[in-house]
Image (cartoon, rainbow, N blue to C red):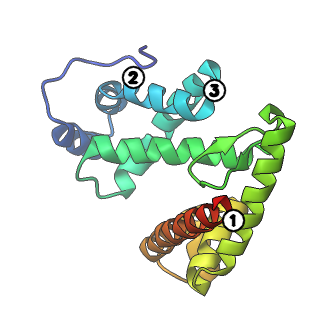
Amino acid sequence: MNFIKTIPSSLTDSELMMAYRSDKDLNTLSTLYDRYIELIYGLCLKYLKNEEDAKDAVINIYEELIAKVHKHEITYFRSWLYQVAKNHCLMILRKNKHYTIEFNPDFMQSPSDLHQGEAELKESQLSLMEDCIQKLTDHQKTAVELFYLKGKCYKEVAEIINSEVNMVKSQIQNGRRNLKICMENNQHQLNN
């Protein structure tokens, strides 16, 4: 799959990034992006579950990079690009109203795919999640609710709670971990 015309290059990722930052030549960025286009397509397909949506996302992510590469300090382009692509897909899923967040915030599922028994299980899991959210610290609770339930991005959450983006990421990560632990403990108690 090659969406973008590229030029062959023996330069490293870092060298290509520096070259793009200095000359703003889109062929340079295309060469860099093309190295990971299959990885990004696979990631988008995993999250979006639709080939056309995944192809559109791959193109949109490339367009985002044109500006983002200049704004961020990037040490490892591949892992940074992977995170950008993952966040892009998650934002698409959050904006798409027919997707909901399961008890595990990393997993998205369409309610139309649920059978009656699964719907009842989901309802009990959501109830359990609501109880566990109340047990988080105030900062974690607010960050998790804004990010997962209200669909806000990191920057928006940071602005709302008057905090740094890195602090918000930490609060969300810690809140998600504590939420998972609480839910696993409560689920285990329910099963016994």
Residue 47 position within the rendered picture, expressed as x and y whole percent measured from the top left: 57, 35
Q: CA distance from mark 1 to mark 3?
A: 30 Å
Residue plotted at (21% across, 45% down): 18
Quarter of the picture holding the C terminus: bottom right
Which comes before the other along the chain, label 1 or label 2? 2
Front residue of 153/45: it is: 45
Label located before the other in sequence (3 or 2): 2
Which three-letter amino acid code belongs to the residue tagged 1? Met
Where is residue 117 shown, x and y percent of the image?
Answer: 82, 40
Mark 3 burial class by Cα count in 10 Å: few <14, some 14-19, many 20+: some
Q: Which mark is residue 38?
A: 2
On-image quarter of the N terminus: top left
Instruction: Identify the residue at image location x=57%, y=26%.
Output: 54
Of the residues under marks 1 and 3, which one precedes in the sequence?
A: 3
The amino acid type found where label 2 is placed reads Glu
Residue 13 lies left or right of residue 186; in this view the side is left
Q: Which image quadrant for residue 38?
A: top left
Residue most extreme to the top: 1
Distance (Cα) linking label 3 and label 2? 15 Å
19 relative to 155, above or below: above
Image position, residue 19 (x, y; %): 21, 40
Nearest the eye: 94 or 182 = 182
Per the image, label 1 sits on a secondary structure element best described as: helix
* Label 3 element class: helix
Outermost residue, right direction?
Answer: 116
Residue that mark 1 sits on: 129
Res 89 quadrant in image: top right
| Relative image position of residue 63 (x, y in whole percent) | 50, 36
Using the numbered discs, state the Cα–Cα distance from disc 1 to disc 2 in whole angstroms: 36 Å
Tag 1: Cα neighbours inside 10 Å, few (<14), some, or many (≥20)? many
Mark 3 = which residue? 53
